[in-house]
Image (cartoon, rainbow, N blue to C red):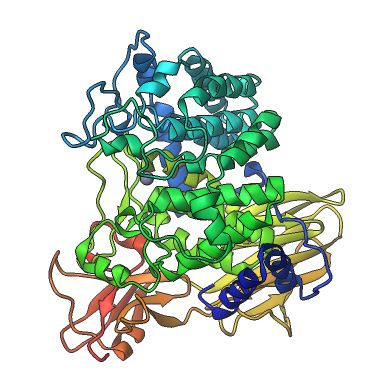
């Protein structure tokens, strides 16, 4: 979507009005103006996909093990303390700790958001159960939900700086417990949670930094940092999963229309200054308003906002330096390369990014959203440091010219809540389906198993992607089956080719689209996809064309420095583009000042690096 056509199209659509623009979206997809919108692509279940990529699986094993090792008493401790109950067991500390006298100006990282990750952790455990079938995981989910249900009191919400945030996450944890861990009491506990929380939430979406709790210290802005505008996504999900009509009505009520979705639907850029993660996350609420309530205005708002976000994204796919969205056309992204190390809130940001692009891809079938997912996955969250048992967590990716990979000082921050969810969700981001069709969205070594017309099929993808450009798919089926397989041809993949059983296909879709192979498939059929991984440079913005990142296919290659704060040898455009491969994941540039090694984010370890290079010949 860095290409112009989609943006121009959406702008034209916005001028013509929401309804017309949304139907224009379908025209764009199908090429047939009179055809009705295709129904959204469907997700597969967590258990349908088996991933064999070490990078992805290590993240799931790490986060799952950390969560399983947390004691129930420790997890319940802030809920019990805030509700005036006995609270035995170790205190997890960090953001999770409850301190009645908390003051962010004295010690920001201790007691900031007690209990805020609980729902995300229950959600991740329920999804991990769906993946692994591990009975101990399911039992932990059921046990935590019952213990939590005993603590539900108004006092928890009254004392909490983040009543809406915490409620939102609790609802999702319970919904995932219902759907994936088959907790028969989960929906009843959702209802109990909602009855208790609602009187302590604002009556409608309240913007970040807006005072709404008149009984709290007006000199303490931390009482205005809650995120009620992100709630509709999970409220609509609650309605969808059978919690009742009440949740549909609540979803509508908390949509942040006036200052946010309405201008976005008119293609008015109102991103500047907003808190990055939570406002991008709120776009998933807009997508659920479309999917559940049919609101084309909200679909348009999400499409437009995502295009605006891409214009202010780094080459890695990350966005929001210092957790702020920026004004269009400003120099702030370039300035961020020197004035901050807090470039992208990575686990939370990529969780929001994956959800949003998953919704958008399902609705529009536009392969550009898959490109964006892939870029963010390989260059950001897949390379974070593992979550530690003591709550140390990776938070910010660093795109400073003097970059380093470090843990956040604070323990158990928000990003320790989202990373376990990200790790489970690689499965549902990889493949999608429609009637008699499967979409290959992400190229990750894995096997998909599913039923089609009474036949049991499996599709296995293998290869060294994204370090090598070839991906091989082999298929098995219990009966020959007519089926369309759609392969994403990334926008950068000029000259992509595809062979079926060794026969090269004459027509492959243009880069930036899905290419379709429709035939009767039988066991042993094989598809070979070749995506040429040419080197290219992407400038930080149009006004700083000499400040560039080197990319090879979806991967940003970062320049390793001899030591922190040392200058990089001077490089020209030609030298950088001429980087030679030394090994599977390592490249090298030669220059008169000496060699520079280049590594993807997933291979950097603790080496100092820079994501962007200032060319000497621009
Ligand atoms: Zn976070």
Q: Which sits in the foreground, 418 or 598?
A: 418
Residue 442 in view (yes/no): no
Q: Position of residue 600 (x, y in %)?
A: 36, 66
Q: Is residue 363 above or below residue 68?
A: below
Where residue 299 sits in the image (x, y, percent)? Answer: 63, 57
The count of marks equals 0
In the rendered view, would you say 149 is above or below 333?
above
User: Which residue is depicted at the point 34% across and 32% down?
Assistant: 113
- At x 33% / y 72%, what residue is drawn? 330
Dividing the picture into quadrants, the one containing residue 337 is bottom left
Taking the image in four quarters, ligand 1 sits in the one at top left
Left or right side of 523 for 414: left
Instruction: State which quarter of the image contains the N terminus.
Output: bottom right
For the point 69% across and 37% down, the residue is 240
**Position of the C terminus by quadrant:** bottom left
Q: Is residue 468 left or right of residue 547?
A: right
Residue 167 appears anywhere in the view = yes
Q: At which x and y percent is residue 355? A: 55, 51
Residue 297 position in % (x across, y down): 64, 57
Q: Residue furthest top?
A: 86
| Up-down relation of residue 40 to residue 123 (above or below) | below
Name the residue: 22% across, 42% down.
Answer: 409
């Amino acid at each position: 979507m860095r290409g112009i056509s989609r943006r121009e199209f959406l702008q034209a659509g916005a001028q013509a009005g929401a309804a017309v623009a949304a139907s224009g979206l379908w025209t764009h997809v199908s090429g047939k103006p009179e055809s009705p919108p295709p129904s959204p692509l469907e997700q597969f279940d967590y258990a349908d996909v088996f991933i064999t990529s070490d990078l992805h699986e290590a993240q799931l094993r790490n986060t799952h093990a950390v969560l399983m090792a947390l004691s129930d008493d420790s997890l319940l401790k802030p809920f019990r303390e805030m509700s005036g109950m006995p609270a035995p067991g170790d205190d997890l500390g960090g953001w999770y700790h409850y301190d009645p006298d908390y003051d962010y100006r004295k010690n920001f990282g201790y007691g900031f958001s007690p209990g805020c990750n609980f729902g995300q952790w229950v959600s991740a455990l329920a999804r991990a159960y769906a993946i692994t079938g591990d009975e101990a995981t399911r039992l932990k989910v059921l046990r935590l939900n019952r213990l939590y249900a005993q603590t539900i009191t108004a006092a928890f919400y009254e004392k909490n700086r983040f009543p809406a945030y915490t409620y939102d996450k609790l609802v999702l944890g319970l919904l995932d417990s219902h759907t994936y861990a088959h907790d028969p009491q989960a929906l009843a506990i959702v209802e109990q949670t909602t009855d208790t929380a609602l009187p302590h939430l604002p009556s409608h979406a309240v913007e970040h930094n807006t005072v709404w709790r008149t009984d709290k210290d007006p000199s303490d802005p931390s009482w205005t940092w809650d995120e009620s505008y992100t709630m509709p996504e999970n409220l609509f999900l609650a309605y969808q999963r059978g919690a009742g009509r009440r949740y549909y009505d609540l979803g509508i009520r908390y949509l942040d229309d006036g200052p946010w979705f309405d201008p976005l639907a008119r293609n008015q850029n109102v991103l500047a200054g907003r808190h990055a993660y939570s406002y991008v996350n709120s776009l998933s609420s807009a997508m659920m308003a479309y999917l559940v309530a049919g609101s084309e205005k909200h679909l348009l708002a999400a499409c437009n906002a995502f295009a605006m976000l891409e214009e202010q994204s780094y080459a890695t796919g990350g966005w929001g330096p210092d957790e702020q969205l920026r004004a269009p056309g400003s120099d702030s992204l370039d300035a961020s390369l020197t004035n901050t190390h807090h470039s992208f809130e990575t686990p939370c940001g990529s969780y929001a990014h994956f959800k949003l692009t998953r919704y958008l891809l399902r609705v529009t079938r536009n392969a550009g959203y898959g490109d964006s997912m892939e870029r963010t996955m390989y260059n950001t969250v897949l390379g974070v440091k593992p979550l530690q048992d003591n709550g140390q967590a990776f938070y910010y990716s660093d795109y400073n010219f003097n970059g380093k990979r470090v843990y956040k000082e604070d323990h158990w921050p928000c990003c320790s809540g989202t990373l376990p969810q990200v790790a489970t969700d690689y499965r549902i981001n990889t493949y999608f389906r429609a009637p008699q069709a499967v979409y290959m969205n992400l190229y990750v070594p894995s096997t998909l198993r599913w039923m089609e017309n009474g036949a049991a099929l499996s599709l296995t993808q293998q290869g060294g992607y994204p370090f090598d450009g070839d991906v091989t798919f082999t298929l098995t089926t219990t009966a020959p089956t007519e089926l369309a397989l759609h392969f994403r041809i990334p926008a950068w993949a000029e000259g992509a080719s595809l062979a079926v059983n060794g026969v090269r296909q004459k027509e492959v879709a243009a880069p930036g689209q899905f290419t379709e192979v429709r035939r009767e498939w039988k066991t042993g059929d094989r598809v070979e996809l070749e995506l040429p991984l040419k080197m290219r440079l992407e400038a930080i913005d149009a006004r700083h064309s000499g400040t560039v990142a080197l990319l090879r296919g979806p991967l940003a290659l970062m320049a390793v420095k001899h030591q922190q704060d040392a200058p990089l040898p001077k490089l020209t455009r030609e030298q950088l583009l001429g980087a030679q491969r030394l090994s599977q994941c390592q490249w090298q540039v030669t220059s008169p000042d000496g060699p520079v090694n280049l590594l993807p984010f997933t291979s950097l370890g603790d080496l100092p690096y820079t994501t962007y290079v200032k060319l000497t010949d621009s």
